[in-house]
Amino acid sequence: MTSNFNMRDVESASDLGRRLGLSISNLSLLVRALTHRSYVNEHSQAVEDNERLEFLGDAVLDFIVGAWVYNRFPEMPEGDLTKMRSALVRNEQLAKFARTLNLGRALRLGRGEFTSGGQDRDNLLGSAFEALIGALFLDSGLGAVDAFVNPILEEARESVLNEIRDPKSQLQEWAQSKKLGAPRYHVVSTSGPDHAVIFEMEVAIAGVVKGIGTGSSKSSAEHAAAQEALNNLGMI
């Protein structure tokens, strides 16, 4: 493995910029955005890692995403706007964006990080995406970031909307707001042949059953039970 290292399979910053259609005039910013601290620790010629750019990119993304959500959903109440923004800027989602851009192949990592698969690790990918945004902002301004990020956000719109409207999440938030503890899901029964099992699931809060639902999987049955619970609680 040592003989195969040397970052030979890593995409260059200039190639990444061309592939993503980024017109970054200061290429060193893009190189820095792709440089993990583990690389700096092993290469004396590398001056700085991407952590400062990550800090900046985090702030820029908060603003860009907040503005996008506000303008994209003019009828959405403030509470849901906050949920939508939070769902879009959390590290797991940023890592998904990075994977969509195939950002991992361009990360400059130290030997240990590289050989242990750091180029596909959520925390590194999410941080690199933020650093990329920070670099783009410094080089080209807020308009360039907006133009780059908006199509990415649009592509994630439906999945994130479904997530924030997930009845299980809504029921859990309600239970926690009432200090009743987390909802508990329990299989009541199963029916049907092995290849088409139907699950009946109930959900209880503080020991009181609030809803019952069925589905072809435990997950879908939990979803249906949470939906009924919300109906029974007058929340839908």
Image: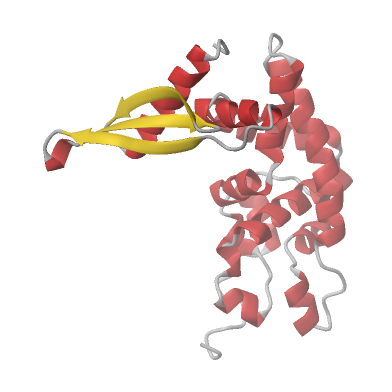
Residue 3 vs 62, above or below: the answer is: below
Which x, y percent locates residue 236? 54, 11
Q: Residue at x 44, y 30 (%)?
A: 203
- Visible residue check, residue 21: yes
Q: Classify 201 as above or below 101.
A: above
Residue 146 or residue 156, whichever sits in front: 156
Residue visible at 83% across and 61% down? 51
- In the rendered image, residue 201, in percent from the top left (x then y), is placed at 35, 32
Is 20 drawn above or below residue 116 in the view shown? Answer: above
**Residue at screen point 51% across, 87% down:** 1
The one of 206 and 51 positioned closer to us in this rendering: 206
Query: Residue 64 location in percent, x, y?
Result: 78, 32
Q: Quadrant of residue 103?
A: bottom right
> In the visual, does 184 lie left or right of 77?
left
Q: What number of labels is visible?
A: 0
**Residue 159 seen:** no
Q: Which residue is the extreme one toward the left?
A: 193
| Residue 176 location, quadrant | top right
